Amino acid sequence: MNTTEGLKREIGLWGLTSNIVNVVIGSGIFVLPAIVSERLGAAGILAYLFCGFLIIVIMLCFAEVGSKVTVTGGAYAYIEAAFGKYFGFLTTNIFVFGSSLMAASAVANALANTVSYFIPLFSNPLPRAAFLITIFSLLALVNVIGVKKGITVVKVTTIAKLTPLLLLVVLGSTKVVTANLLWQGIPDVSDLGKISLILFFAFQGAEGSLSISGEVKAPGKTVPRSIFLSFAIILLFYIAIQLVAQGILGDSFPNFKDAPLAEVAKRVMGPFGVTLMIAGAAISMIGYLSSDSMNMPRVLFRSAKDRVIPVKQLANVHHKFATPYVSIIFYASLCCFFSIIGEFRQLAIFASSSALLIYLGVALAVIKFRLVKNADSSAFRIPGGYTIPIISIITILWFLSNLTAKEITGLGIFVGLLSILFLILSLLNINDRSEKNG
């Protein structure tokens, strides 16, 4: 079935769930457990439970707004519908250029580094560039051919990335030393807060996955169900991995910060385990890129269609495949370019703080829609009145308060520049309309 946007609703519950899981469970899970253990030890499980609760609270806001605003664009469409074009413009640019583009470029670089472990040739600049061009070209091609093909790739890579982790948990559970899981005391609140701030970033990404809402079957039901199901899977995986790794490595856990799960796999399965985990990390990165290459072009497409981005070609839909092919090719090209010229590791916190701003906008949108929109009986509604969105807002502001003065300044400058750009574009549009009317 084609939507009013010219797209097809072909994504069901498991397709959207796979998309969310694929993005959220990224390469970070292969290194984060050691960072958690270093500060909290066996009590690190508390950080996972705390972050799990917080992200579910925020995703409840996404579920409610996502069941009401069912067009393509995800968080951008939600915020633009609630607060207008200025905030839609900020969301699009913060989302695409402040967060996703840089993150995807960094992941692509990490993928090239991982593949070079097996094929040293890719350590050289030219073969490395050729590898990255090939990856993004294939991802663009698959997504241009059709969202059904794109979501199939996402499903396959999701299963492929979870299989080695599941194998590690199942086999590793037989070698867990119970003494390594005993708490040495209740962790300090400040330590829990600092580690949770770092770990919280491992739960992000679902906002990008919801950008394909315009191609989801029965979005009023599918979106909230997919959010709940995906985060139940994610939280179970994270907790199981942390417990098994802590139970096997014990006090030596922090000594393997670069590849803690590879060390666990080595102790459980020998040298084969190391290869399996490295391959799993590579598949995980490909999975992230496959979802990102499908999700983010939809944000560009929707914002161009709404004329928030003044490049109307980005709103073009392929006459045969019914996909936003110009946005797909454009985004893949940008990712490829930036992945070749740099790693952008220094922008990691900046990208994460950008995501938090988007979360804040969606939580505020829940309140705005309840105040001004007529109730939709088919839409999902968070129980408890305004409690959940208010808790989400307080939580997000608390996380943002942990940024350094330099990071806050950088974020402020970025938003300020975008605001100036929006003003200039608005003035140009006003002048264009005046000339046509004159």
Image: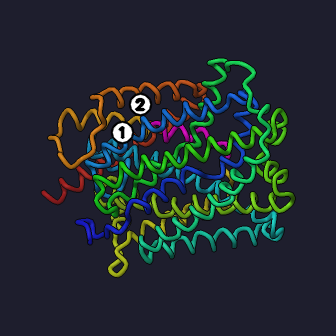
Q: In this view, does 35 lie to the left or right of 326?
A: right
Q: Indicate which disc, 2 or 1, sits on the residue closer to the N terminus.
A: 1
Q: Position of residue 381 (x, y in %)?
A: 27, 40
SS at mark 2 in the image: helix
Main SS, magenta residues? helix
Residue range (magenta):
345-357
Q: Position of residue 354 (x, y in %)?
A: 50, 40
Residue under the image location 81 percent in, 70 percent down: 119
- Numbered-mark total: 2
C-alpha separation, residue under disc 2 versus residue under disc 1: 8 Å
Residue under the image location 50 percent in, 24 percent down: 398
Task: Identify the disc placed on residue 41.
Answer: none
Task: Identify the disc placed on residue 392.
Answer: 2
Residue under the image location 33 percent in, 26 percent down: 387
Residue 401 higher or lower than 70, as above or below = above
- Residue type for callout 1: Cys
User: Is residue 308 covered in magenta?
Assistant: no
The answer to whether the residues at label 2 and label 1 have Cβ atoms under 8 Å apart is yes
